[in-house]
């Protein structure tokens, strides 16, 4: 086995990312650079990500992101051993922009191209940051996803359960919008929650049901009802808004912790429990999961915030893992809007 230096490219949602990761066998991987250009301000006025705008912004920013990633790593294109790119799932325009860019780059330099599943990128991140060994239990929780995965190899993921409706990140974003807080909603709701208290009674759907499926849409509806009931002359007092945020965040944390307990029951062979995805940036949720693992005596890992949300370092790392398994793609690599693990 040899040292691998891989360029990663990410453009499946509203972050344009390029990163370089290097890995020598037997040593911890090194993130040599990790560039992310967010698009939040482009979508802010629309209260959500607009796919057309996202795709165009990716096309505009990809080259610059790659140039910056190489410069920050102090490398030239010739120092690379391959190009890994998110090939799905995601907003198809953005995924296509990334795949085309990666193909051009790989073809021009004669490098192997590795198509990476965005979810695999998130799910393998704890191996990049903490050198986690297989098998481990993974909670992937983001704006578009919420699932428990049994991870037994870099290309073997089994879904143990997940949301049957909305993803928690989406609920955070919609609630922020309903409370006139800026997007993306997660960090804003967390900030407001820190000023408020968990005093509003909200449902914890599916909590009494077996297995580790989850539901968040009823919770979201209950939050909207609580807001409407608390309006004073058509406006919501700031303190009530903060209490709603604190109560909502507590409910989400309760659901995730209770279902993580069930998922751990379903995977007694797990050597660790890892959480990733944008919602894993939430302090209350991390603390709840960490307490659960302490109680269970199992190692808990949550990647640093910048590696929890969308980034290209996780894609470069997943590319290294696939390359080590001898898995590469060619110029027929397709962008896939849907791509279950
Ligand atoms: O993984 P990610 O960057 O993108 C995908 O969905 O793939 O996750 C973004 C989501 C957004 O919904 C955002 O509101 C949420 O993660 N998020 C948070 C926090 N930071 C980001 N949710 C709760 N608390 C946070 N601190
Ligand atoms: Zn993501």
Image (cartoon, grey):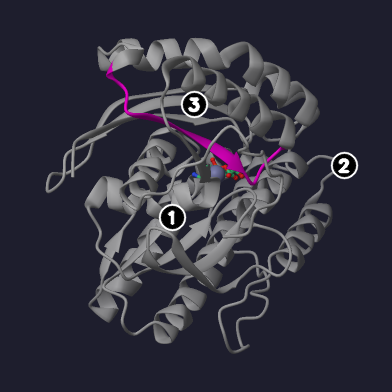
The quarter of the rendered structure image containing the N terminus is top left
* Residue behind mark 3: 17
Q: Residues within 10 Å of mark 1 (few under 14, many from 20)?
A: many
What is the C-alpha distance between the residues marked 2 and 1? 47 Å
Q: Nearer the viewer, residue 341 or 300?
A: 341
Mark 2: which secondary structure? loop
| Residue bearing mark 1 | 123
Q: Residues within 10 Å of mark 2 (few under 14, many from 20)?
A: few
Q: Quadrant of residue 51?
A: top right
Residue 39 falls inside the magenta stretch = no
> Quick one: label 3, few (<14), some, or many (20+) residues within 10 Å?
many
Percent x, y of residue 260: 46, 74
Quadrant, the C terminus: bottom right
Of labels 3 and 2, the one closer to you: 3
Residue farthest toward the right in the current orientation of the protein:
233
Location of residue 321 with respect to 103 vertically, above or below: below
Residue 179 in view: yes
Cβ of mark 1 under 8 Å from ligand 2: the answer is no
Sequence order check, earlier mark of 3 and 2? 3
Q: Is residue 326 left or right of residue 106?
A: left
Instruction: Kindly check if marks 3 and 2 are in contact, taking CB atoms under 8 A apart as contact.
Output: no
On screen, residue 323 versus residue 233, left or right, reads left
Q: Position of residue 117 (x, y in %)?
A: 54, 48
Q: Measuring 60% from the left and 47% from the top, which residue is drawn there?
A: 242
Compare marks 1 and 3 and give the one earlier in the sequence.
3
Query: Circle 2 sits on which residue?
Result: 233
Boundaries of the magenta span: 79-91
């Amino acid at each position: 086995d040899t040292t691998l230096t891989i360029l990663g490219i990410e453009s499946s949602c509203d972050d344009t990312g390029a990163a370089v990761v290097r890995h020598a066998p037997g040593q911890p991987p090194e993130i040599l650079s990790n560039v992310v250009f967010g698009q939040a301000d482009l979508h802010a006025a629309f209260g959500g990500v607009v796919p057309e705008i996202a795709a165009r912004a990716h096309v505009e920013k990809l080259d610059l992101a790659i140039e910056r990633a190489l410069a920050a790593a102090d490398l030239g294109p010739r120092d690379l051993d391959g190009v890994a790119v998110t090939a799905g799932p995601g907003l198809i325009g953005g995924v296509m922009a990334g795949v085309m860019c990666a193909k051009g780059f790989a073809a021009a330099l004669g490098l192997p191209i590795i198509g990476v599943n965005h979810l695999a990128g998130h799910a393998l991140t704890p191996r990049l940051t903490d050198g986690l060994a297989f098998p481990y239990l993974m909670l992937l929780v983001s704006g578009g996803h919420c699932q428990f995965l049994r991870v037994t190899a870099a290309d073997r993921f089994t879904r143990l359960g997940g949301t049957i409706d909305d993803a928690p990140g989406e609920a955070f974003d919609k609630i922020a919008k309903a409370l006139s807080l800026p997007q993306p909603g997660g960090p804003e709701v967390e900030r407001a929650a820190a000023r408020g208290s968990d005093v509003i009674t909200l449902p914890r759907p599916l909590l009494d049901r077996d297995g580790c499926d989850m539901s968040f849409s009823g919770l979201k509806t209950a939050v909207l009802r609580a807001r409407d009931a608390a309006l004073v002359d058509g406006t919501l007092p700031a303190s009530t808004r903060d209490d709603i945020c604190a109560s909502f965040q507590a409910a989400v944390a309760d659901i995730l912790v209770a279902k993580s307990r069930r998922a751990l029951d379903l995977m007694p062979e797990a050597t660790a429990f890892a959480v990733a995805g944008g919602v894993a940036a939430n302090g209350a949720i991390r603390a709840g999961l960490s307490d659960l693992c302490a109680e269970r005596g199992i190692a808990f890992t949550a990647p640093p915030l910048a590696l929890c949300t969308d980034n290209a370092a996780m894609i470069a790392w997943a590319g290294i893992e696939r390359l080590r398994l001898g898995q590469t793609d060619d110029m027929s690599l397709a962008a896939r809007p849907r791509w279950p693990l």
